[in-house]
Each structure stands twice: as structure tokens, then as C-alpha cells.
Amino acid sequence: MKIITILATLVTITTAIAQNPHTMNEKEHFQQPFPQGAENPPVNAQYFIGQSYLTQLTHDEALNCPVYNVTFEPGCRNNWHSHTGGQLLLVTAGRGYYQEQGCPARELLPGDVVEIAPDVVHWHGAAPDSWFAHLAVTCNPQTNRATWLGPVDDAQYAAATAEPASAARISPEAARNIAAWQAGEEWFRSDPELAEIFGNFAFDETQRYGDIDTKIRILTTMAAAVAMQSDAVFRMTLRAALSGGITPVEIRETLYQAVPYAGMGKVADFIGTMNAAFEAAGVRLPLDAQATTSPDDRLERGLALQRTMFGEQIDRMYAASPENQLHIQRALSGNCFGDYVSRGGLDIRMRELLTFSILAAQGGCENQLRGHIRGNLAAGSDKRTLLAVITQLLPYIGYPRTLNAIACINEVIPEND
């Protein structure tokens, strides 16, 4: 049986390997109970980040129990993958990690046993600062096949191996959400105190408030990241969206919705990041079109949508606008609402929640924010929903902009209402 059908392996921090290039002739073997073997052959190495080694320990086919010793240099890990027949990992030396999709990573030390059920998507590999070795035992070898998926990128690996994520100081709920959102950068490890404070607040405390679903949490945070020009937060939400079942169209429409409210100057770079992630995930581009208007009817249909959401206020805005500024009112109707807000892929309620998030995150848009709080009410959201969204955004946008948004909410929707 090919080794590729047996092993479940990890991806590495490529920078660590680049800074410390070694070959088998340049360094001693890692001390462990079983032979280290030669470098993993290309047929297997293509599914690893970093350097790994492999040796087969059992050869009698009559025993029907293939066992391999797999050794990882520091930071080395294999791709996300699964086995149709399951697998056993018996840890023999060093320190490593094992993670199932949607779950926190588990630290592995000598003597640990990992039982991997059939078809469970997972990865495993070395800690950033330690060699690691385990025996890989193939279960049900006659029918066991491996399905290899995408790599565990640097951010995912850093989040999984960050000390606070596996320590008692991070709450179980925060650790679960950190893993599900594939959150965390290098500073999660280098700055454990900040990781503890931010991790518990952003991924536990604030997420307890309100009953908004995970899709709203991820996409509103993504919209705020675009408004703030935060590449790190955008990439985190992009990973969370792709791994959490949010469709590519919904992700794309979140960025498109930001164009009229934040400007293409803030959105353009994120379009490239998004499309690169889509292509890496095997998503074919371009995605299906979602336009519902044409150049001939965009103004008429956009104006109708405005009136549906904001009522007579739209006509008053047109009536009060000086002649030399009417073109802006028409642009709001035809471009903002006709070209963007009317698109498919997201319903109007979600689009208004995204707009609320974009305006709140930018700051200085309180007049427009009040208007779109009313738009959110018209679209079916209530005060509790808006407070839940702004609470979700608080760790990312800070207290001044959060408090400004809450003041606008209270002005439009007084507590006694």
C-alpha cells in the first residue's frame, strides 16, 4: 500500500525552516526509540510544510498492520486530511500537536495516543520549538484511503500552537472559538498576556452577549475589518468564513457591500486577498453574477428600494437638495442602492447589518449611522440585534467608536421603546 494512503501529516512555519536549512548530512539524527529514516519522498512531502522523515517499521503483509515512524523537524506539519479507515498515532519523542477541524489543538508528548476516527479532518506535526516523532498505524488497511486537503497556513499553525490557547488561562469557550475562527497570529505566542486578555474577551465574553448566529458574527467583523483597513482581522474572518460553511458568494458580497460605504480605496486590496484564498480552496472564478438591475433601470429600482427602507425621508432629501447637488442624490439611488444594495447573494437584513458595521467601524459617520439604524429596523433587525453586533465588534473597533454607535442606537431607539 502506498505510504500516501497511510500517513496523516503536518504543515510547517516556512520561515523557520528557511532560516534554519539543514540536510541529513549536516546534523545529527533526532534522538528517539525508532530509526529516523530518510527524508520523506516527494509523493508524501508535497503534503507537508517543513522537513519530515519516514521509515517503515513493519513489512510482513500477512500481519495486515502497516506501521511507520514519522519524524518532524521543528515547525513541520502536514496538511488538513482525513482517512477513510481511521488511524492511530503513538507519540514516541519530542513535542507536537494534533488538531481536528473545528476543535482546539491538543499538545502531544511521549506516551500519548491519538485515536483518529474514519473521515475526521485533522492535521498533526511538531511544535515550533521542538522535534517530534510518532508511530503512524494504519487501521483497516485494505480499504483505508487518505484525502488530502489544503495546508495549515502560518496563521492557523500559530493559533493552534499558541501557549495561551492550550493553557488554563484561556477559557474552554474561548479556545473553542479561537480554533473555529482559526484565529491568532505570531503575537499570540510572543505576547501571552495580551493573547490571554484579548482571547478571553473577543472569543468568549463578547460572544456570550446576544443571540446572533455565527455567520452574522463573522461577516460583520469582516466588514468592519475592511472599513478599518485591518489585513490581519480580514484574513482571520476569511479563514473563519471558508471553514465555517459561509459561501464564497456571501463573502464576496460582503466586500462588494463595503464599496459604496467605505470606498474602493479601502476595498480593492481585500478583493485580491479574497480571490487568492478562493483559488487556493479550489473555487472557480469568476463567481456567479448577482446583479438585479441594468443600466436602464438601476436608478428607478434603487430609488424604489430606498423608499421601501426609508420611506418619505428619501423624497424630502431630494426636495431639499440644491440643484448642483442632485447628482449625489441620484448616485445614492442608482449607484449605492441600484448597483450594490439590490444585489443577490445576501438578503437586505444582512446587508443593512454589514452597513451598520462598516459605518460604526469607520467612525465619523454618525449621521449616516443613525439613518442605517432605521434601515436595520425596516429590514427586520431590532435593538437587541444591533447591540449584539456592536458588542461583537467592540474588541476590534475599540470603545470610542463602540460608545458612539450605542449612543446613536439609543437616540433612534430609546430604551422605553
Image: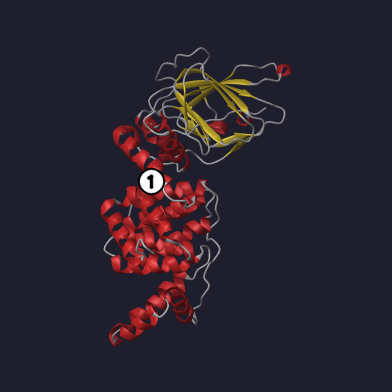
Count of numbered circles in the view? 1
In screen coordinates, is 173 left or right of 115? left
In screen coordinates, is 62 left or right of 358? right
The answer to whether residue 39 is visible is yes
Q: For the point 65% across and 21% down, which residue is it?
A: 66
Q: Quadrant of the C terminus?
A: bottom left
Judging depth in this view, the residue of 248 and 220 nearest the camera is 220
Q: Residue furthest bottom?
A: 323
Where on the picture, by quarter, is residue 14? top left
Percent x, y for residue 22? 40, 25
Q: For the point 34% across and 79% down, which residue is it?
A: 328
Percent x, y for residue 355? 39, 63
Indicate whether 170 appears above or below 410. Answer: above
Residue type, numbered disc 1 = Thr
Judging depth in this view, the residue of 386 and 152 nearest the camera is 386
Indicate whether 85 appears above or below 255. Answer: above
Q: For the point 50% across and 36% down, which residue is it?
A: 103
Percent x, y for residue 85? 67, 30
Q: Residue furthest top?
A: 33
Q: For the point 35% across and 82% down, which residue is it?
A: 316
Judging depth in this view, the residue of 199 and 51 nearest the camera is 199
Percent x, y for residue 228? 32, 55
Read off the residue under disc 1: 206
**Label 1: element kind:** helix
